[in-house]
Amino acid sequence: MTWNWRALSNSATWPLNHSAPSGSAKIARPSTPSSASATTVSRSYAGPSRRKGFPTPSNGSAAAMTPSGARARSLDVCDSRSCPERQPAIAHTSPTTHFTTASNAGVGEPRSSASRQLANTSAVPRSRTVEPMTPLWTLSLALLAPTAAAHRWRSARLTGSRSPLGAAVQTPSANNCSWRVFNQTLDHFGGAAGTFSQRLCVYDGFVAGAAATKVLFYVGNESPVEEYVNNTGLMWEYGAAQGALLIWAEHRYEGESVPAVDGVENCLSFCTVEQALADYAVVIDALRRDVIGDAPVVAVGGSYGGMLAGWFRMKYPGAVVGAIAGSAPIWGLPLASPPLDGAAVAIARNFGSAGGNADACAANLHAAWPVVTALGATAAGRSFLSEAFRLCDGSIGDDAGAGRRLAEAVQGVFFDLAEANYPFPSTYITSAVGPGLYPLPAWPLRRACDGLNESLATVSGDVASVNFSARVDGVAAAADWDAVATSNVANFTLEELRAMPTLTSLLEGVRGAWAVWCNVTGETQCFD
């Protein structure tokens, strides 16, 4: 039986027979279960969540993380205290894969002649994984390289006129989704039993006629899928222009697509790139047989999702005719032997002319890191840093590592600002890993340089190997990769440091760069 997607109501259930994806590439089933052979990528994170403005000392323990970004612990069996949030609707013994309508907090107005209703889902916990902190001096090396809703959604002008809900409805928006649930296999490659409910957001408002002739399929990544529905304007713009059916699939172990794995051995071994790609292949195969027929499907993704889109086209060429992979360094993993500071190099281009800033901004930041670290080694320097950075009382600590922690805290937010360095205000990153729906300004990394575009310090030595000296006013410090080799900070009293205007300007400029993220609410009185 072939189902007409547009004719389905929210009470419909789609019985589908589970099989491997169509096309020349089938899902391989090795003799050994994935739980026995799965690998993890170990990455260390030496600080707290980036939602905090200032990290406290870390115990230095490394968290094991799977390639798909789910945080792992050294456990053989999962329990409710150690695993990601669970969804109880699991049919461990069911042999059938099927679509159902997701439960919703509310129902929208009818959108078509078939009276298919839109679903408004309740808010789901944000589970975006925090990236590891950039090491202190790698950013110095990298610095060598030369809603505001009306602004946020360019696509609203294109899609509003064609939306069945009317031009007043703003898109992109997860409120425009019809939510479906796919009964997905937990382990595509081994013998582990079980299924889980995988969420899909579907929008057919651009489809003309009874059936879709083109499909854009977003391969979800490391957040609840609403994050990508609300922020992937390209899907909505292309969908409006091409009359395409839009589908977003949530990544396993994210949002509400989390298996019930209490008591399951090696529970996080099922959260891998390979399993996620197989999920998407199975979903598309089921859609082809029962909903979209031979309509061409193009995979879409960005960042980790973009890498998934590229790999998906390579591994399952029969599932999609192409992939749009944004910000997707698919060869930037071990095959290409990326440098230790490769991510910092990309981020730091923004602090020079390549990012629309004066090159002095990059030079000032070069100088700031060893100077801040050196100042933190003395009581007078710590007091001066607390004043210049407007730190909350007592937050800097009283040990010699205070300056280094402060420098790492400031550097840590540059990753977030680079992710959100759009030419328009955006809440994309702040809603995922920050304080919520507070828009960052347009070009936030340019705003980070607002107080640093004039030359405030001198740098000499081999910056490329992070072996250089910095001087501002009378303060000097020498960097040797991740440590301060020498400095003269101990020679100065607090009063003498306060009397150095250029040093004060440098530190206030760095504080301003930090505040673009840490004070995005505009309400922060002191940083902690």
Image: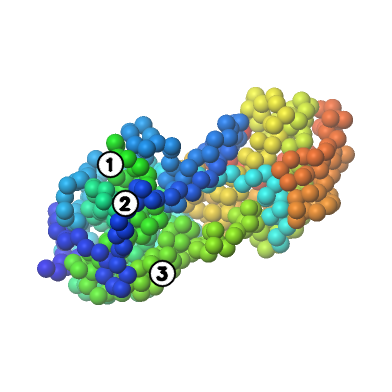
In the image, 176: left or right of 223? Answer: left
Helix, strand or loop at label 2? It is: loop
* For residue 239, above or below residue 409: below
Please tell me which residue is depicted at 42% across the width and 65% down the height of the picture.
311
Q: Which residue is mark 2?
A: 33
Residue extending furthest toward the front: 31
Query: In the displayed structure, does residue 515 sit left or right of residue 12?
Result: right
- From where the camera sits, is residue 450 visible? no
Q: Position of residue 484 (x, y in %)?
A: 77, 39
Amino acid type, residue under disc 2 in the picture = Pro
Q: Which residue is mark 1?
A: 260
| Quadrant of the rendering where the N terminus is positioned | bottom left
Left or right: 282 as drawn, with respect to 427: left
Residue 28 against residue 525 in the figure, above or below: below
Q: Amino acid at mark 3?
A: Met
In the image, what residue occupies the spot 31% across and 62% down? 28
Type of amino acid at the residue the image marks with label 1: Ala
How far is disc 3 from disc 2 in space, using C-alphas? 23 Å
Q: CA distance from mark 1 to mark 3?
A: 30 Å
Measuring 36% from the left and 74% from the top, which residue is drawn there?
321
Q: Which residue position is annotated with label 3?
A: 314
How many residues crowd around disc 1 within 10 Å: few (fewer than 14), some, or many (20 or more)? many
Q: Residue at x 29, y 45 (%)?
A: 259
